[in-house]
Amino acid sequence: MADNILLSLSIIIIISAILTVLARIIKQPPIIAYLITGVIVGPLFLNLLGSGSSELIQTFAHIGVAFLLFIVGLSLDLRVLKEVGKVSTVAGLLEIIITGGIGFLIAVGIGFSSLTALYVGAAIAFSSTVVVVKILSDKKEIDTLHGRIALGILIVEDFVAAIALMLIPSLSGKADILVLAREFAIAIILIVVILLFSTKVLAKFMDYLARNQEVLFLFGIAWALALAVVFDKLGFSLEIGALVAGMSLASSRYRLELEGKIKPLRDFFIILFFVFFGSQLAGDITPSLIKAAVLFSAFVVIGKPILVMTILRIFGYKKRTNFLTGSSLAQISEFSLILILLGFTLGHLSQEIMSLAVMIALITIGLSSYSIYYSHSIFNKISHLLFLFEGNKIYKVKDKEERYDILLFGYHRVGYKILKTLKDMKVSFAVVDYNPKVVIALSKERINTIYGDAGDKNFLSEIPLDKAKLVISTIPELGINITLKEALKEKSSHAVFLATAEQPRMAGDLYNFGVDYVIVPHHLGGDYVANIIKKFGTNKNSYLSLGKKHHIELNKSKKDSGFNS
């Protein structure tokens, strides 16, 4: 039997590896490859998972979920909610409530029971942190305005999902409201005790453990699994136990070290979780099941982005930001699959709903991956149809006849540093940004600001580009910088144009397009560090003095940015 299990496990890993390579070629996240692997090795095709293998894979899947939620918990420092901002918090909560509510009504409308509809509505309300962060990181867009808003919404969703994982086990056939209230109170008390213990006692103990990296690594695993088992034995889920274990260490100075060491272990087990879930696409794939999957997927891919765009429009953001943020969230989450698996384990959901969840995941994650990768191209083609999502509630472009010697596009990244120099130069300048909070913050400092999207040709035609002597773009998006250069050419401007690029290849493209000088932050940063080393040598005091000055400037720039204000 052991040989059969080893053979099945080996085949699963081999198929996963091959499909992961193919997924990367066609710009799909690994989750898709793992789910398809599960479909292939499941009962519909190879049927490699016999009773022994299936139980082992399911056990590994639960361990993978525990490690995944432990690492998620490590990132859920309660202070994070203060950092995601009002926009992300409100948008995240509204998106969950409205999307989940509509999903519930759709499920009830096609004949699902109220409990099943509640699970399905919750599942489609969450978007995938793993997918969104991976693709936006690949595109170098995590630190853009839409990337920061999307990430903030995902953080809010993770908090809500954590609460859902806590509540769902309490629904297991217990109709007495007093029983539910008692169990919820016990869970809250237990969590508070664990968090207090970790703050008062565990933090000091970890200072001792951290002297040896292997001991710290083993402690992290033991802490995650121990709390998972404790919560499971008390009648809650092991998932919430692992999540609480992570949250209890979220404020620890060793959080990043633990996260980095446990991630490879998590990645192995989480592969088996998605494979196991994919293998649940079993039984008859009926026309009604396919219709339901298409209906829910259409709502997730189309309805959810429209909802997010509408919410952001109310906050005054431009249609480009609204579209790029909304299109990033058009899929269901790994949390969605965990919730469905939990409901199946508790006996709340049938095998058919498991199959439905697999199909929705494959459709939405597959489609949204392309929509995120090609979001800028898609926006350029349909932007004229998105006029309803163009924010103009409060912020207006200043008189286009006003003249500025220098125009600075983009305040974040290196923009705040350039702004300091412009102030010292005593020249007329204006900052152009499409983040309303930046505009408000700079306006309070009596700095000339123009609110608008640098990638919108219509907007560029309304501002005095032809009057400027110097135009600086700190926005590292190739398409936007090319659009700016074209706008300068159309206005017959003789202004010096400085653009920004993340990579040397993009810098070369901009030079070929006629940009006067391209700022490549990594390249300039390397030169700067080399000069510091040449100047200071091994003089520790010189580095400490410069470091203190740098720290003060970084804190000031964070405060001045306006995003978190």
Image (cartoon, rainbow, N blue to C red):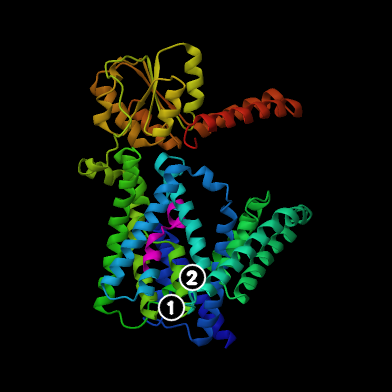
Quadrant of residue 113 within the rendered picture:
bottom left
Residue depicted at x 49% and y 76%: 176
Q: Can you identify the residue that label 2 sits on?
A: 168
Q: Residue furthest top?
A: 426
Task: Check the image and report above or below for 529 versus 81.
Answer: above
The front one of 376 and 179 is 179
Amino acid residing under circle 2: Ile
Q: Is residue 124 magenta?
A: yes
Percent coordinates x, y for residue 563 in the rendering: 47, 36
| Mark number displayed over residue 513 | none
Amino acid residing under circle 1: His
Q: Is residue 26 visible?
A: no
Task: Check the image and report above or below for 336 versus 485.
Answer: below
Q: Can you identify the residue that label 1 sits on?
A: 348
Q: Regarding mark 1 in the picture, which secondary structure is present there?
A: loop
Q: Could you classify mark 1 by the number of other residues whose Cα lies within 10 Å: few (under 14), some (14-19), or many (20 or more)? A: some
Q: Tags 1 and 2 in contact by the CB under 8 Å rule?
A: yes
The front one of 153 and 526 is 153
Q: Is residue 143 magenta?
A: no
Percent coordinates x, y for residue 461 in the rendering: 24, 25
Pointer 1 or 2: first along the chain: 2
Question: In the visual, does 331 lie left or right of 250?
Answer: left
Query: Residues in magenta?
Result: 120-133
Quadrant of residue 352 within the rendered picture:
bottom left
Q: Is residue 451 visible?
A: yes
Percent coordinates x, y for residue 72 in the rendering: 55, 58
